[in-house]
Image: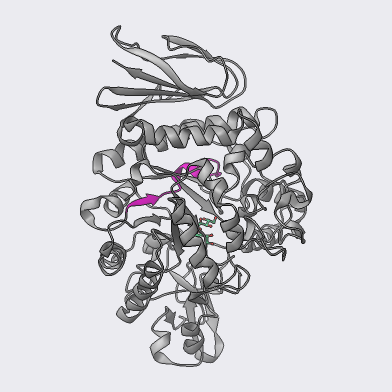
Amino acid sequence: MKDFKKATIYQIYPKSFYDSNDDGFGDLQGVIAKLDYLQQLGIDYIWLTPFYVSPQKDNGYDVADYKMIDPIFGTMADFEILCKEAENREIGIMLDMVLNHTSTKHEWFQKALDGEKKYQDYYLFKRGKNDSAPTNWLSKFGGPAWQNVDHLDMYYLHLFDQTQADLNWRNEEVRENLYDIVDYWMKKGVMGFRFDVINLISKPLMLEDDQEGDGKKFYTDGPDVHSYIKELNEKTFGKNKDIITVGEMSSTTVDNCIRYSNPSENELTMVFNFHHLKVDYAEGEKWSAVDFDFINLKKIFNHWQTEMIKGGGWNALFWCNHDQPRIVSRFGNDTKYRLQSAKMLATTLHMMRGTPYVYQGEEIGMTNPCFQSIDDYRDVESINYYRILEREGMSKQDIIKILSKKSRDNSRTPMHWNHSKSGGFTKATPWIPLSANFDTINVAQSLNDDDSIFHHYRRLILLRKQYDVVALGDFTLIDEEHPQVFAYKRCYQNQQLVVVNHFYEGIVQFELPKLDTILTSSILTSNYPDSADYSDLITLRPYESIIYLISS
Ligand code: TEU
């Protein structure tokens, strides 16, 4: 059995990973073809985003049949081979379970539309009030969260796209059906699950208008969420102690996350929260192009590290995923200091306490593609917001500028395997354009260069396995108010790490904690070949990042 505290998880967005049959879409055979590469990186699990039958309005997060594989990704036989081949390489497969909503093309929803009361009760169908929607809640993808169905004279709730109808978790039969789906995949030999927006599943009995916001305060970490997750655990993955789980928690709190992930609660293994990725929002508004707030970033990490340790919870650590822009373009420098800043960001994250996730392409320092036209975008959220911002009077140029920083498509461009046409991803036309820099930033180049970002990630993944302090140490932030450096200490038994990360260009001096003379220090890894030895005051170069190991 793998120890999740020492594990690293690699996220694959199959549509953009590798196209084995040259139809322009990545597929499961494409994942199989690249398993050796992932083994070389040293990861322990692969989280695959949804590949179930889906109209693909939200790239598979709109599931029409949970037990079938969408033909664009391959067949069940492909999936079974993938599980076996991954297992041969000691890699576990984690599946994405989208249990908050289904596609409106799902047969349950179709039967509800046909007037079957039983299936209407699978969703949140409500009568409108005074000729308008049941509440004033807003969808996370823009516009109202309720869609009217004329012939039923009712609205249904969709927190995401109109084609993603929220399920009614109060209905026991719905829950049993969902547990059966999880069971079905467990029997296929999967080793983990990522539960999509699982903290949004519990809606209050009485739905009311939100006088201040978009409605999220009513359903985020909702009234019965902990009891539903406990039940999900008990009836499905809790039966196999080797299975690991991660919950995606939207706008959550640390107290809830301790409950979600403290083992004594029998809920989940770990949790994603997004607070650290909102430091470049302008007063809570994602669709803005402002610099990130560095001090706040440190404070948020410090809060989540120390509070989760105190409460016995477990963080999933991540900079990137399929919903987030590329980190090197976001908090790093994707031009002159791409190499140094990508490594620095990796070190900052991987030396914290929690289980790190690497999103495909992050390990070679892929950047945002900087699309110049709305025609290059595919993401439903980005396209919706393009229209909304245009209606609000923003210029096309300003909207494109914001999208090029914030769109989810920034991370969804095809993986760069080599410098050949389409980056070796496909021989056909890819479903979404590539970033133009695939000729210099690609896997082939990274594997050949000992100094590459890839090899830095490989070393970090290994350090977590080699040093207990990485997995188990406590966490203390050093110099919280320092405007350029994010440094922290980790301690476990007689081992200590001091991790120093310079987030900006230029040269900066930084004071390190004084060491007892009986202690010795060495550099475990750094992103410059000649970083300074440990001393009370060190000088850091642009984006310099050093891990010191202190021992007695
Ligand atoms: O995302 C949940 C979610 O709310 C965000 O990450 C969202 O994409 C972002 O806040 C928009 O600004 C999950 C999936 O990861 C995402 O891909 C799906 O679109 C969404 O759920 C619905 O299933």
Name above or below for residue 127 compared with residue 277: below
Q: Using residue 406 as the reference point, say whether residue 110 is left or right of it.
A: left
Q: Position of residue 326 (x, y in %)?
A: 60, 44
Colour scheme of the rendered structure: one colour
Total marks shown come to 0
Q: Position of residue 235 (x, y in %)?
A: 27, 70
Q: Position of residue 404 (x, y in %)?
A: 68, 48
Name above or below for residue 38 compared with residue 448: below
Residue farthest to the front, as pictured: 88
Residue 41 on the magenta span = no
Look at the image and tell me whether residue 495 can be seen: yes
The C terminus - image quarter: top left
Q: Position of residue 88 (x, y in %)?
A: 45, 54
The answer to which image quadrant residue 366 occupies is top right
Q: Using residue 236 as the reference point, say whether residue 529 is left or right of it.
A: right
Look at the image and tell me whether residue 196 can be seen: no
Name above or below for residue 240 compared with residue 469: below
Residue farthest to the top, as pictured: 517
What residue appears at the point 61 percent right and 70 percent down from the top-left corner? 57
Span shown in magenta: 269-283
Name above or below for residue 488 compared with residue 307: above
The answer to which image quadrant residue 193 occupies is bottom left
Q: Using residue 405 as the reference point, say whether residue 220 is left or right of it.
A: left
Foreground pick, 192 / 224: 192
Foreground pick, 158 / 110: 110
Foreground pick, 174 / 307: 174
Foreground pick, 356 / 140: 356
What residue appears at the point 55 percent right and 52 percent down from the top-left corner? 35
